[in-house]
Image: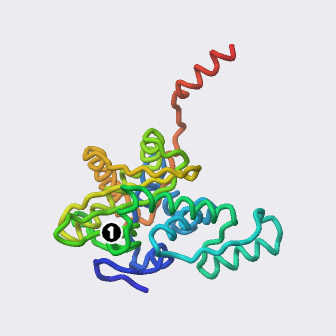
Amino acid sequence: MIITEPGLYDIPEDIYHSDPVPGGSLSSSTAKMLLPPSCPAIAKWKREHPAIRDDFEFGSAVHKMVLGKGPQVEVINHEKWNTEIIKAKVEHARANGQIPLKPKDFARAVRMAEAIRQHPTAGPLFAPGTGLPERSIFWRDERTGAWCRAMLDWLSIAPPWKPLIVDLKTISGSSLESVVKQIGNLRYYQQAAFYTTAVEHLTGEPPAFLFVFVDVNPPHLPLVFELQPDDLDQGRARNEEALDVWIACQESGEWPGYSTEVQSAPLPPWTHRQIAMIE
């Protein structure tokens, strides 16, 4: 499948991640990797070598159970995947576009999905008929002309209400402190800004954006979180930087790594406290 026109698309996840835009399009995950503390060389390598990780697959299974869309889950009835026969079953499931899960992880994903459905705020956000699950938006950035793409977990664009994006995240510890830390560490504020830009291009109206975090640990408490406007502005500024780097790398064919100069930086403060305690 080839995408040559901006718009809203209902396409499989694997097609989206293969980047169906001729010449390439910038996604939020690549935009984050183009900038420090990462670098363009890492962004390019990860685009060309997509990784399969158990935690990614588990998160995809939770998404499937909550959103009602996505790859089918295949339970591999062994708690240890340590034999060639079992490994072959796992790879066969992946080759068929399924999400392989251990029985205990499947049961945990079911409990997490149920916790979201029962939550008085998070549950109604994903109610059937209130939004579109896993829709992809492709657009051209007005300033640079670069193609961009975003796959949204949940999009509600029913008039007369303001467009709403809901993004589902798994987390270990859904306290407010844990959520804020993960948003900062994984630069979710940049992702949120990228997605709101996508919907604004689609509808002509700035959307609202909400995160729904659900704890992987019992009792799997959800937490609904909204970014402050200044944080979204910071995300937009970072995305503008990433677009400039993306254009430069595409035009030059060069994807630089870290500095080749000798580097120096002070150790973090906790190191000195640790040394003092030992002494």
Q: Residue furthest bottom?
A: 1
Coloring basis for residues:
rainbow
Quadrant position of residue 137: bottom left
On the image, numbered disc 1 is attached to which residue?
Answer: 155
Amino acid type at image mark 1: Leu
Residues packed near mark 1 inside 10 Å, few (<14), some (14 to 19) or many (20 plus): many
Number of disc labels: 1
- x%, y% of residue 248? 36, 61
Where disc 1 sits, the SS reads strand
- x%, y% of residue 182? 47, 46
Give the residue displayed 42% in from the left and 80% down from the top: 11
Work out whether residue 252 or residue 159 is closer to the camera in this orientation and state it. 159
177, above or below 19, in the image: above
Give the residue displayed 50% in from the left and 63% down from the top: 44
199, above or below 9, in the image: above
Quadrant position of residue 102: bottom right
Horizontal side of 24 relative to 231 (left or right) equals right
- x%, y% of residue 204? 18, 68
Task: Classify the position of the N terminus by image quarter.
Answer: bottom left
Give the residue displayed 28% in from the left and 61% down from the top: 196
- x%, y% of residue 230? 26, 44
Horizontal side of 208 relative to 102 (left or right) equals left
Task: Classify the position of the C terminus by image quarter.
Answer: top right
Horizontal side of 179 relative to 173 (left or right) equals left
